[in-house]
Image (tube, helix red, strand yellow):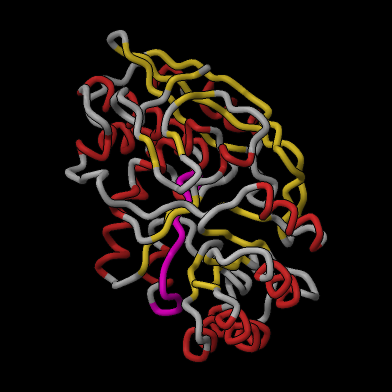
Amino acid sequence: MQIALKKYTLQLAHTFTISRESRDEQDTLIVCLSLNGQTGYGEATSNPYYKITIEGMMAEIEAVRNQIEGYTFDTPENFYEHLESLNLHKFTLCALDLAANDLYGKLKGKPLYELWGTSAEKYPITNYTIGIDTIEKMVAKLQEKPWPLYKIKLGTPDDVAIVRELRKHTDSIFRIDANTAWTAEETIKNAPLLKELGVEFLEQPLKADDWEGMALVKEKSVLPVIADESCIVESDVEQCGGYFHGINIKLTKCGGLTPARRMIKKGRELGLQLMVGCMTESTVGISAIAQLLPQLDYVDMDGAMLLKGDIAKGVEILENGKVIFPKLPGSGIELL
């Protein structure tokens, strides 16, 4: 098996702001794994919140290149066990695992969702994300991209007023993501007002380790609450089960498709609502997420839709939210 590493800087269509940062571009690492004339592609982005750089991930992979290329590839699950023994960071694991899964599907000649025994006939549609900005610019983004379902990033002194103004311009469903910016009291106070404004659920309103606050929110909030920053890896699912109504799984944070599938299984056992989210990836990462769609209740896979230009072909998302799965097997990815 051969490895190739490619670094890209993705340009965003608009400045993207959440409660803790703003950015106009996103660095990303594409891992290419080749075997028997087929190539699988995986992706992981840099992330200042988790102190992840592209150079750091590339250095990790280069340090164990021989152990990876010398591995006799059979299944992504066995390959993942091998990768874990090399003590790689979760983001690095993700890029390699996504590539391995894409490669495996291409070698088998089937899309991953089919290999996993699921059907792509029914699936949730993705939301489209509106980052924090002036109200005028947030309204303009709504009007520029008519969509049936929006995720609104909040974490300002005027959050309810923002949603109230946005509601004047669309009948679409809203989801709210405060990215840990609220207190328990704010969340409980805001929830009924936001519910009246057509909000479906709240994502990670409190700091990731505020379990006491989340216990209060789960008891008193009139809106369901979905974990994000509180649910990073597989071991977090069990704890989140007592404090949230659902979990948002990020492939980069948990280490890829292989652990994400186990998190989905555990979440179902606990009766949690299941969501998979993105990290402003290109179509490489988004196409991997799409393979999980039949197993999910919600999905946030609009990363490639937020870019000025893409670096790959794969899953295509139409204006009504419908997903066109590529004919190519695996995750269906081709680099441009």
- Image position, residue 153 (x, y; %): 66, 62
Decide: is 318 above or below 122: above
Provide the residue span drawn in magenta: 242-253
* Residue found at x 78% / y 75%: 158
| Residue 257, quarter of picture | top left
Count of numbered circles on the image: 0
Which one is nearer the viewer's eye here, 311 or 147? 147
Q: Is residue 87 visible?
A: no
**Seen from this angle, which residue lies furthest top?**
37
Please name the residue shown 66% across and 36% down the image: 53
Q: Is residue 189 above or below residue 57?
A: below
The image position of residue 6, as x and y in percent, is 57, 20
Q: Magenta span has 207?
A: no
Viewed as shown, does residue 138 lie left or right of 28? right
- In front of the other: 309 or 218: 309
Q: Quadrant of the N terminus?
A: top left
In the displayed structure, 67 sits above or below 245; it is above
Position of residue 221 measured from the top left corner of the image (x, y, whole percent): 52, 86
Q: Position of residue 178 (x, y in %)?
A: 65, 68
* Left-right relation of 170 to 165: left
Q: Would you say residue 65 is visible in this rendering?
A: yes
* Above or below for 114 versus 201: above
Residue 33 image-quadrant placement: top left
Q: Residue at x 36, y 61 (%)?
A: 297
